[in-house]
Amino acid sequence: MFIYLFFPTFFPQEGSGITKIPEGLKDLTPSETEKRNLLIERFRETLDLWGYREVSTPTIEFETSLSKGIGTEMTNSMFKLQDVDGEVIALRAEMTAPVARMTSTRLGEWHKPIRIFYIGPVFKRTRRSWDDSRETLQGGLELIGAETPYGEVEVLTLLKDLLRRLKVPEATIDVGHSALLKELAELFPERTRRELMNQIRLRDKNRLTKLLEEMEKPEEKDRVKVLIDLLETTSIGEAASITSNIKELKQYSSELEEIADWLKELGVADGIGFDITLIRNLEYYTGLIFEVITPSIGVPIGGGGRYDNLMEKFGAPATKAIGFALDMDKVSRATGLTPPKKVRALIFGDPRIAYRIGRELRGKGIPAAVNWGQDGENLLGFAETWGYTHIVKAESVEEASILKLGKDGWTKLSVREIPDEISQATGDS
Amino acid sequence: MDAPIRICIPSKGRLRDPTVALFEMMGFPPLGGGRDYIQGTTDPRFQFIFTRASDIPLYVQYGAADLGVTGHDLIMERESEVYELADLNYGECLLVLAAPLESEIRSGMDIPDGARVATEYPNLARKFFDKIGKQVEILEVSGTAELAPRVGLASAIIDITTTGETLMRNGLRIVEEIMESTAVIACNRVSYKTRRDLIEELLDGIEAAMKRGEPRCI
């Protein structure tokens, strides 16, 4: 807005085609970029504290490899192109498959568990214009070679810590179980299965209750009751006990019980709840799945789960794994973190002296820019817009004047005193 | 104070009046001019957003609204990831396959492969034909699908009907019923967890109002 006022000629006429970008993509201004970078920095620090090491994979890979285990919906949503030799390559739509590929081919011999993290963009060819992002910055981790409940407990505890450090307000984690839900569905005759899953997804208790009344066999009635009870509960421990009487679900029930007990034991159970309606649209999940929500964002800001069969698809021996990713753009919208105000100096006046002062300031680690041929009112607006904290006027080889933004009046100083005068301000801002 | 719970109400069409009547019965009449898209009510904890019924599933899915009154059919068509917390028992309708009275079409299977079918519900239509294994050409129209067979644009239509009158007037008859629908309360999945108490309170109010008398103003 400010920039527009000062430099209206920078902005081409409305409606000219070259000024548009495709739907679902965005530019980041300096302050938006700084906020994102701060989040990335915090993300890296936290993961490092937990013993995770950063990796990077290419943005473009063979479609056959990127689509391993992710399911048709996600595969269809990838941007695809043809390589010079005719092979189909694609932009990654998620990070777990590429990281699993890399781990099985490059880190196969490394001692397990492998703790790795990544930060990078993923791309989706969304058809629905409401899905606002076709390019998203994802930050996530994979814990490869970790059994249940140890993997789940580490990842959920870490995620809680990460959300706290990223200052996501009132963040909560909802936990579901993909295998439990699948197994539960299998217990119903095929004709009702799809309808039932739909009702679970919609949390439609009325239709489920109606169905309960229609069921004739007592065991079928019992199972619908289990579904209704699962819809009602928000506690992992309770979900475990609700499912404990069905022998086909016994294994998952004890898994949930163990996880709930450990989370309680470690004092991190608060803010982690159960939600049977949770369905992640990635096929590779085999166990516990979870999503992160925060009140100001209408959709989950991240999620993950256990994927015990994916590594085999890349030729590695069967390896149990679990991971998650956060949508850093959504985290950026929700976070209470703001980049700290930095000291920055804007210098004008005789260019020869101005450049000398600039060099000295940079030598002391103070960002400094020199504006030629501008002074007075103009410069004040410029400094405010671009976040400078000090304006320095290079008067002569010996002398300069300095103005601290927000304070009245210029102070005359010797050129030598300028760096100290400005760096002192670091403390008072 | 927390932001008010935003409730989407259809701005026109057959679901609008009974929905406004329902909230009036609860003592929450929308306050504001008829053309205001966002209106408050007597309770500052709630706010109404008036928008097209077919857009409501998306408003709710992406959290532009916490709750919305819309048709079950529209949620299914949009494959919207929302919760359906209550059935309002009004706005009943059927999604049907209809064909001209004089045609030979007696069921979905009678439609010749490659025939054109006009509909406002392309997604549900595609699913229906996939299920019965028919390859047809779906023509997406944004209203008055029943006109399409009369002007030779399509051999059949998939559309909603309440009494069958409009179909009849256009020389069409129902050949297959695809889905029943009523007005429902759709809820954003995040709001359901973060604003649970207030949402439950509102749902209780709706249930009580419905028991006192069903708002039918169709």
Image (spheres, grey):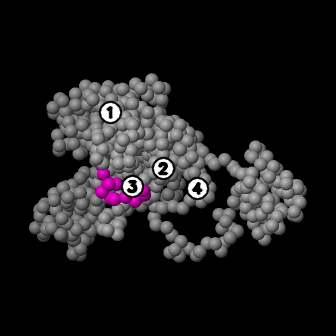
Question: Relative to B5, is A85 above or below?
Answer: below
Which residue matches tag 1? A230
Nearest to viewer (mark 3 / mark 2): 2
Sequence-wise first label, 3 or 4: 4
Nearest to viewer (mark 1 / mark 4): 4
Secondary structure of the residue carrying tag 2 is: strand
Nearest to viewer (mark 2 / mark 4): 2
Q: Position of residue A286 (x, y in %)?
A: 30, 40
**Residue A68 located within the stretch drawn in magenta:** yes
Quarter holding residue A5: bottom right
**Residue A211 located within the stretch drawn in magenta:** no
What stretch of residues is rendered in magenta? A58-69
The residue positioned 51% from the left and 54% from the top of the image is B38
**Does label 2 lie on the same chain as label 1?**
yes
Label 1 sits on what residue type?
Answer: Leu
Which residue matches tag 4? A33
User: Alpha carbon of mark 3 to alpha carbon of mark 1: how far?
Assistant: 32 Å
Numbered label attached to residue A360: none
Label 2 sits on what residue type?
Answer: Ile
Label 3 sits on what residue type?
Answer: Ala
Q: Assess disc 2: are there few (<14), some (14-19) or many (≥20) residues with their C-alpha within 10 Å of its C-alpha.
A: many
Q: Which chain hosts label 4?
A: A
